[in-house]
């Protein structure tokens, strides 16, 4: 189990991505990373080990931008290395963070390899960014590329995508792994759970199985697994329900 965050913000987003990832530490992880859009370009930093390693890296090599995604990884396919850490980026067009497992990644990877696609990681996740990148390469819009990719994926996944040249767009997908949307004041958030977003907003909606969302600062369009536009209720989360402490346990996982 790992953690996902996405922010379309109105100030430098890196510190907020890190803060949310800290709130997701309790879920366990072996590596972490973030990507932002700096002057239209996707840029990322990833580190193995504790979030302090990622913080140190960012202190030395900061990332600018007010839109970003982040991830704490619990490796299922591929060792905990920098190359296997998320976000995964394919070409220059797309970066993705993924929680879960793509069960048919081997078949998809084999097909892509046969077409000459070059992989940079051993993860199941990278087939997702490679597929989306290949559709964008065929002139599909980001949302059309994601809509074409989702039905090809078997398994469990919560995903959050960021696209180069698209400072005001995130796409979130939920199937078999938890994902929530957070509503701010001219800002929008994605997180693995409400706890993660509790310092940013208490206005949350829970995506249902098969939902995917096109998120912009001014609003969100959610579709269900049939591609029909749906409304998901926005609830106000009580801060007292939010607890990210270790409660005397040495590790979050022991708790
Ligand atoms: N299966 C993916 C990987 O191994 C994601 C694991 C996770 O949920 O952290 O990279």
Image: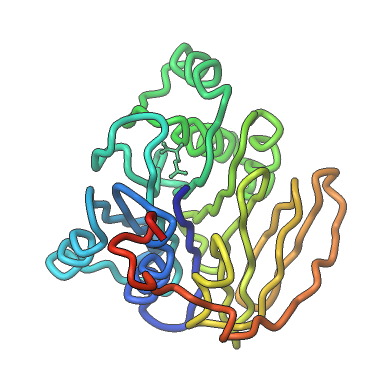
The picture places residue 40, in percent across and down from the top left corner, at 41, 62
Residue that sits furthest to the left in the current view: 60
Badge count: 0
The picture places residue 135, in percent across and down from the top left corner, at 59, 35
Q: Is residue 185 above or below residue 8?
A: below
Q: How is the image coloured?
A: rainbow
The picture places residue 51, in percent across and down from the top left corner, at 26, 61
Q: Nearer the viewer, residue 48 or 43?
A: 48
Q: Nearer the viewer, residue 20 or 240?
A: 240
Q: In percent of the image, x 57 and y 60: which residue is there?
A: 170
Q: In percent of the image, x 74 and y 78: which residue is there?
A: 235
Residue that sits furthest to the top in the current view: 114
Q: Is residue 160 left or right of residue 41?
A: right
Instruction: Tell me which image quadrant ligand 1 sits in.
Output: top left
Q: Nearer the viewer, residue 167 or 155?
A: 155
Q: In percent of the image, x 64 and y 68: which residue is there?
A: 181
Q: Is residue 100 above or below residue 16?
A: above
The picture places residue 150, in percent across and down from the top left corner, at 67, 37
Q: Is residue 16 above or below residue 103?
A: below
Q: Nearer the viewer, residue 56 or 164?
A: 56
Q: Is residue 22 left or right of residue 230?
A: left
Q: In percent of the image, x 55 and y 38: which residue is there?
A: 132
Quadrant into which the C terminus falls: bottom left
């Amino acid at each position: 189990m790992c953690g996902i965050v996405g922010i379309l913000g109105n100030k430098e987003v890196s510190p907020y991505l890190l803060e949310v990832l800290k709130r997701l530490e309790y879920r366990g992880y072996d590596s972490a990373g973030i990507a932002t859009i700096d002057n239209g370009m996707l840029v990322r930093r990833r580190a193995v080990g504790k979030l302090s390693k990622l913080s140190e890296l960012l202190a030395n090599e900061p990332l600018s931008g007010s839109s970003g995604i982040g991830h704490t990884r619990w490796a299922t396919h591929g060792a905990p290395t920098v190359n296997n850490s998320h976000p995964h980026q394919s070409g220059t067009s797309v970066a993705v963070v993924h929680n879960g497992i793509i069960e048919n990644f081997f078949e998809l990877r084999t097909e892509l390899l046969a077409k000459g696609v070059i992989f940079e990681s051993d993860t199941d996740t990278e087939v997702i960014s490679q597929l989306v990148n290949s559709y964008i390469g065929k002139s599909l819009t980001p949302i059309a590329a994601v809509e074409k990719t989702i039905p090809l994926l078997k398994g469990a996944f919560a995903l959050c995508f960021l696209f180069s040249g698209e400072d005001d767009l995130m796409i979130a997908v939920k199937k078999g792994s938890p994902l929530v949307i957070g509503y701010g004041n001219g800002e929008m958030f994605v997180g693995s759970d409400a706890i993660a977003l509790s310092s940013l907003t208490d206005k949350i909606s829970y995506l249902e199985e098969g939902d995917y969302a096109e998120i912009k600062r001014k609003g969100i369009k959610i579709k269900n697994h049939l591609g029909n536009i749906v409304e998901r209720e926005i609830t106000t989360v009580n801060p007292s329900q939010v607890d990210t402490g270790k409660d005397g346990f040495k590790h979050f996982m022991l708790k």
